[in-house]
Amino acid sequence: MDLGIGLRKLVEDYCGGMRGGKKFKGAIAGGVSMGALGPDQFDAEMDFDIGRKYQVMGLGTACPTIFDEDTDMVAVARNIARFFANESCGQCTPCREGTSWVYKLLVRIEQGNATSKDLDLLLELAGSMGIMSGTTICGLADGNNWAIRTIVNKFRDEFEARVRPSLVPLGIGAT
Ligand code: SF4
């Protein structure tokens, strides 16, 4: 098949369609570091412009993983975060500490023990790890960043549904 084939066409014409006739929910175009496509991106063209057009890092391996309507995207994010936390070799502080914090926050969210402030913190961490040039040696932190940030942003409602409102009053600690 040609570079640029639509993801929907790839799934429907070459892979036998969505398993059990389920609805498409999202996908990873090629390797978790590339980030996730959302529910409205089933027609994404599998080519080198996918990052620019669909807010992911890129095409990666071009071996997509498809999520159907029953997939728990919080669990997906937690599983990806566990991978990165395990793989971090520990040489760079932002990666060593950040991947571990992101994983712990996602476990807390998945288990229903988090507040909206934890979700904000998760996004702050996922948005800042590895993006400062010179602070990490390799791209692992960036991979974690893209995976978690795109999943939380594109499936935000699932994360919101798992957290409680923060009870910390505004202005606490102010003098
Ligand atoms: S960014 Fe790369 S080199 Fe640095 S701690 Fe993470 S895995 Fe190790």
Image: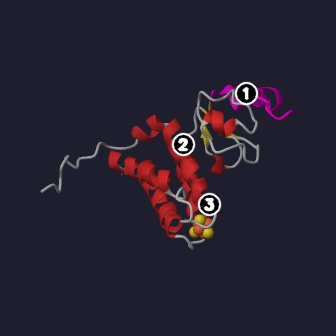
Comparing 17 with 118, the one in front is 118
Disc 2 marks which residue?
151
At x 52%, y 46%, the residue is: 149
Visible residue check, residue 92: yes
**Quick check: 91 left or right of 46?**
left
Write down the region rendered in magenta.
Answer: 1-24
Q: Secondary structure at mark 1?
A: helix
| Mark pair 3, 1: CA separation | 29 Å
Residue kind at label 1, given as amino acid type: Arg
Which picture quadrant has residue 108? bottom left
| Residue 8 circle label | 1
Residues at marks 2 and 1 touching, judged by CB atoms closer than 8 Å? no
Visible residue check, residue 88: no
Q: Position of residue 84 (x, y in %)?
A: 59, 60
At x 86%, y 33%, the residue is: 2
Q: Earlier in the sequence, mark 2 or mark 3?
A: 3
Label 2: few (<14), some (14–19) or many (≥20) C-alpha neighbours in 10 Å: many
Q: Between label 3 and label 1, give the one nearer the viewer.
A: 3
Residue kind at label 2, given as amino acid type: Ile
Label 3: few (<14), some (14–19) or many (≥20) C-alpha neighbours in 10 Å: some
**Quick check: 167 left or right of 100?**
left
Q: Position of residue 109 (x, y in %)?
A: 42, 49
Q: Position of residue 106 (x, y in %)?
A: 46, 52
Query: Residue 18 in magenta?
Result: yes
Q: Is mark 3 within 8 Å of ligand 1?
A: yes
Asked if residue 100 is positioned above or below residue 6 in the image, the reply reads below
Asked if residue 135 is positioned above or below residue 156 in the image, the reply reads below
Question: Seen from this angle, which residue lies furthest bottom?
Answer: 91
Q: Earlier in the sequence, mark 2 or mark 1?
A: 1
